Amino acid sequence: MALSILCPIMMAYFLISHGSSAPEPQAAMAFLCQQLISLGIVGWGTLEGEPLPKKIQAFSGQAQRQGVDRIVILPLFLLPGNHVVVDLPQAIASTESGLPLELLTFLGGQPLFQAWLQQAIAEGSAHILLGHGSRRPEVLPWFEELSQACGVLPALLAQEGSLGRAIEMRIAQGYTSSRIYSYFLFGGRILAQLHAQVPPLQAQYPQHRLSLLSAIQPTASFINVIQQILKAAAVVERVA
């Protein structure tokens, strides 16, 4: 009777973000991956720019040459929009990889990240969670549920007047100020657009003080959450 031998599985990790021409998100992604090298081989790519399947294929070849058995892919997306539901699965399916690819749940849907977000919102004393939004109708109830769990009001840029309605709700409740949490990853041009929207809103509601908190950054606590997610996804041993 043959004996079962426990053999370690060699893992590599690949992170995917939306991509931006602004330097800040690119630098943040590079920094994040650098902080994750204790896990093993870590790479990253974007939906915009170089074709993602080509990027994953090149990473897969590099990882295979270093004895890796499997690649875990974590999409750093915050909403279950078209990129998560359509674009990413299509990109993974069209990738010619010599290694198995495991696509994890997008970051915003990870319970560990949601717990981190609740803490970050509490520490920032935020009152409104402002996200981008999506054409997919299921995104709105998902985002409303997330906001409720975080104890804040929801607002989406893709919905005209959404932020104004959240502010008016705060005013109707008797509050004189609102802190807005930017539910965006690593900033870039979109954060500049958000900052440009605050002065007109402040002029519209002069008796209600508005402040916009920075987008999610690769802080030590954020990096730790990413590490936990990747470690939880890794199968350390297999029976050979």
Image (cartoon, grey):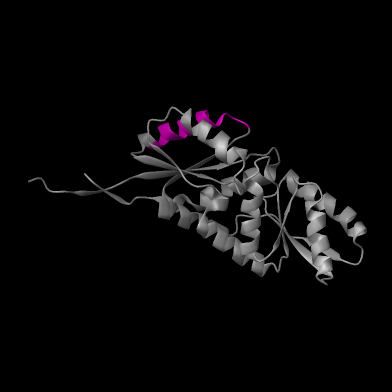
Residue drawn at x 18%, y 49% is 5
Compared to residue 53, the image places residue 225 above or below, namely: below
Q: Is residue 172 above or below residue 59?
A: below
Specify start and end residues of the magenta stretch as a single range.
49-63
Figure check: 56 above or below 117: above
Q: Residue at x 38, y 45 (%)?
A: 11
Percent x, y for residue 127?
73, 65
Is residue 220 visible from the viewing direction of this image?
no
Task: Name which quarter of the figure residue 178 lies in.
Answer: bottom right
In the picture, measured across the screen, residue 104 lies left or right of residue 196, that is left
Q: Vertically, is 239 above or below 67?
A: below
Q: Main secondary structure of the magenta part?
A: helix
Question: Residue at 66% of width from left, 66% of height from top?
Answer: 151
Q: Is residue 215 left or right of residue 91?
A: right
- Does 61 lie within the magenta span? yes
The C terminus: image quadrant? top left
The residue at the far bottom in this view is 174
Q: Is residue 143 visible?
A: yes
